[in-house]
Image (cartoon, rainbow, N blue to C red):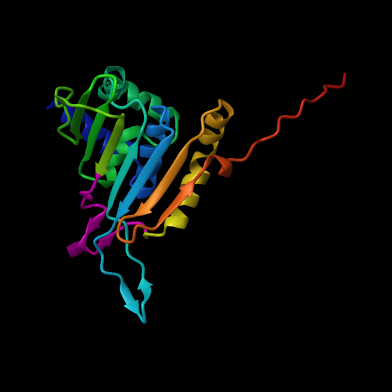
Amino acid sequence: SKMFAEIKRIVDEDISSRVTQYDVIFEAITNAIHANATSIECVLNSYDNPIKENDTEIVRKKVHAITVRDNGDGLHDDNYDSFCKYRTEYKKALGCKGVGRFVFLKVYNHAQFTSSLFDKQEVRSFKFDFDFDTENIDVTPTKVEQSLTEVVLNSLSESYLHHDRHIDRRIEMDLEAIREKVLLNLIPTLFFYKKKGVEITISFKDETTSETVFIKPEDIPDFKEHPFIVKD
């Protein structure tokens, strides 16, 4: 299909082969913030059996699956439309960091989106992959207590993980390091929202141990504004 060719071209040609799972996490969290989320949960899973010596991990386990959940606006018609108008999405993206949601398809084979919409009392879901088509959305009327959107990425692409070819570009399951990178990447955005009075909390959880670390509103610096006088 035309869409397939277009998505594949963008992913192959326009997205740096250097993107990593960090970029996937930045993108998913940024999308949540732009959808007015105030609570964002990033759950990381690993299927590795870490190599241990006297109960100490010598080789750290690596991140396999990433799930990001948020309480933002979710996949409303206009949000979904902007998702489907990938050309505008793409043009916008060229001007900013990364290339939007196409980053997901550089690292993973697909991203599964599910959105429970409180005001519509329905659940919308679709799979974003090379065969993605605007008609692919499932809508199910359901009793929804509160809006929740979730993106699940769990099928790594062969250019990222391929045991036979000894390719393994997965990031380490190091919550502090991941939190630190996200904080550095998102400080301008989080600062902008904090200044507008929006307080955002982001949690990072290692699903294998349930260990959790946070980025809280108080972690975002209050930049002081100094009036300055122009001397003639």
Residue 165: x, y in percent? 20, 62
Q: Residue furthest bottom?
A: 54
Quadrant into which the C terminus falls: top right
Residue 169 inside the magenta-drawn segment = yes
Q: Is residue 59 above or below residue 169?
A: below
Query: Does the rendering let one see residue 28?
Result: yes
Q: Which residues are magenta?
A: 153-171
Quarter of image, res 145:
top left
Q: Nearer the viewer, residue 135 or 191?
A: 191
Quadrant into which the N terminus falls: top left
Q: Is residue 148 above or below residue 22?
A: above
Give me the residue at 24% from left, 56% from top: 161
Residue 228 inside the magenta-drawn segment = no
Quarter of image, res 32:
top left
Query: Does the rendering let one see residue 20?
Result: no
Give me the residue at 21% from left, 41% from top: 110
Would residue 229 be found to the left or right of residue 55 on screen? right
Q: Is residue 31 above or below residue 87?
A: below
